[in-house]
Image: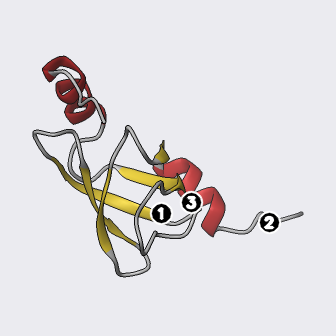
Amino acid sequence: MKGMSRAQIEALKARYPAGTRVQLDRMGDDPRPIPAGTKGTVIAVDDMGTLHCKFDNGRSLGICPEVDSFHKISEQTESQDIEPEMSM
């Protein structure tokens, strides 16, 4: 793995501040991966660019942007997942 530039790491820190909600799409090479689709909350982004997260399934693990696939989710998106639509 090549490593990220300082600018890339600072961009990650700005995009994913503590408290940001993310959803894992695929975990690369972890021997005990978090299942795809699991949501979590960013605790911090370290100086190597790893997003340390507390997942809703109780696990805590770092997401490596160069290896793992994930995306940011909004509170609005999450509430739509949780609240069933009401029909009139």
Residue at 61 percent of width and 68 percent of height: 82
Image quarter (top left, top right, bottom left or bottom right) of the N terminus:
top left
Please provide percent x and percent y for residue 76: 54, 49
Q: Which residue is mark 2?
A: 86
Residue type beneath disc 2: Met
Q: In the rendered view, would you say 86 is above or below 16?
A: below
Q: Are marks 3 and 2 in contact (CB under 8 Å)?
A: no
Which callout, 1 or 3, points to the residue nearer the camera? 1
Residue type beneath disc 1: Lys
Mark 1 to mark 3 CA distance (whole Å): 13 Å
Badge 3: residue crowd in 10 Å (few <14, some 14–19, many ≥20):
few
Residue at 46 percent of width and 69 percent of height: 33
| Residue 55 visible, this orientation | yes
| Residue 73 visible, this orientation | no
Which callout, 2 or 1, points to the residue nearer the camera? 1
Q: Which residue is mark 1?
A: 39
Which callout, 3 or 2, points to the residue nearer the camera? 3
72 or 4: nearer the eye? Answer: 4
Q: In the rendered view, would you say 62 is above or below 59?
A: above
Please provide percent x and percent y for residue 42: 28, 55
Q: Which residue is mark 3?
A: 79
* Secondary structure beneath label 3: helix
Write down the quadrant of residue 67 in the picture.
top left
